[in-house]
Amino acid sequence: MRFWILPVGKFDVDATVLDPSTAPGHRFAIPVYAYLIETPNGLVLFDTGCSNSCRVSPQQLLGDEFSQVLVPDLSPEDMIPSQLGRLGFALDDIDLVINSHLHFDHAGGNQQFSHHRFMIQEQEWDAMAKDPAQYLDPAASAIDRTQLTLLNGDTVVEAGVTLVSTPGHTLGHQSLFIETSTGPVLITSDAVYTREQFDPEHVGASTDPDLAKASVARLLDIVHDTKARPFFSHDPVQARQEDWRIAPLFYH
Ligand SMILES: [Zn+2]
């Protein structure tokens, strides 16, 4: 097995994007990631980054106000086809796409996978269908129902690759637990944006804050029980300050 953490762009954000309780006016860059797993049964892509519309016309996609507090900094090289290409893969090599959730920066690349299998939590799909506006990017839901396997809770994808139900940030959010030769890694996705928010008392923006707190507590338990290393979705300093292999480096 090989496992890559793919850097798929950056956002220049106001601090309120990560923590709505903080004072506005402080800006910094945050990374966006997707993840690629080569299993004995094929290539699995976890999250698909942003859409080309987000790169080319963010104001139109995100709206006047949000595109000011969150300014996408995306080059063509940040997009999923380029990220796969530099590892020697093409879109058609992907056997399964999984979304942590359907926000524009985790599922914006979905529409490029027009005949691929998808796995998404049923609650996430239903929440998006009820209120598509809150998900911002129609490219995220441009999936034919026949492509889709809807999940209900924790799911073993392959030996050593498990989806962990972590609702709260969105109603059907899921994280990814993966065994590597250097030990298990827990990809929190947006259940936890940064290391400071890996604390039930400091959860970030959430659709359901109580569920979000419970999910953070659950991820803390998993880290405690398995000694997994947590990797946070938008931590501005993690990749610099900690010893992580970012693609083209990879884990076995
Ligand atoms: Zn999100």
Image: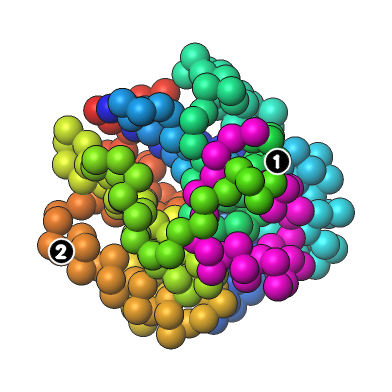
Q: CA distance from mark 1 to mark 2?
A: 37 Å
Q: Looking at the image, which is closer to me, 172 or 41?
A: 41
**Quadrant including the N terminus:** top left
- Residue 136 in percent (x, y) is at 74, 60
Residue at the disc numbered 2:
224
Mark number displayed over residue 203: none
Which residue occupies 54% across, 69% down? Answer: 123
Residue 135 inside the magenta-drawn segment: yes
- Residue 95 in percent (x, y) is at 49, 30
- Residue 78 in percent (x, y) is at 61, 32
Residue at the disc numbered 1:
111
SS of the residue at dot 1? helix
Q: Looking at the image, which is closer to me, 181 or 39?
A: 39
**Quadrant including the C terminus:** top left
- Judge whether residue 182 can be spotted in this image: yes
Asked whether mark 2 and ligand 1 are closer than 8 Å, the reply comes as no
Residue 192, quarter of the rendered image: bottom left
Furthest-front residue in this view: 146
Kindly identify the amino acid type of the residue bearing the numbered disc 1. Answer: Gln
In this picture, which residue range is highlighted in magenta?
115-143
> In the image, 81: left or right of 97?
right
Which residue occupies 79% across, 50% down? Answer: 58
Question: How many numbered badges does the structure rendering display?
Answer: 2
> In the image, 45: left or right of 58?
left
Residue 73 inside the magenta-drawn segment: no
Furthest-top residue in this view: 88
Which of the two labelled residues, at mark 1 and mark 2, occupies the earlier sequence position? Answer: 1
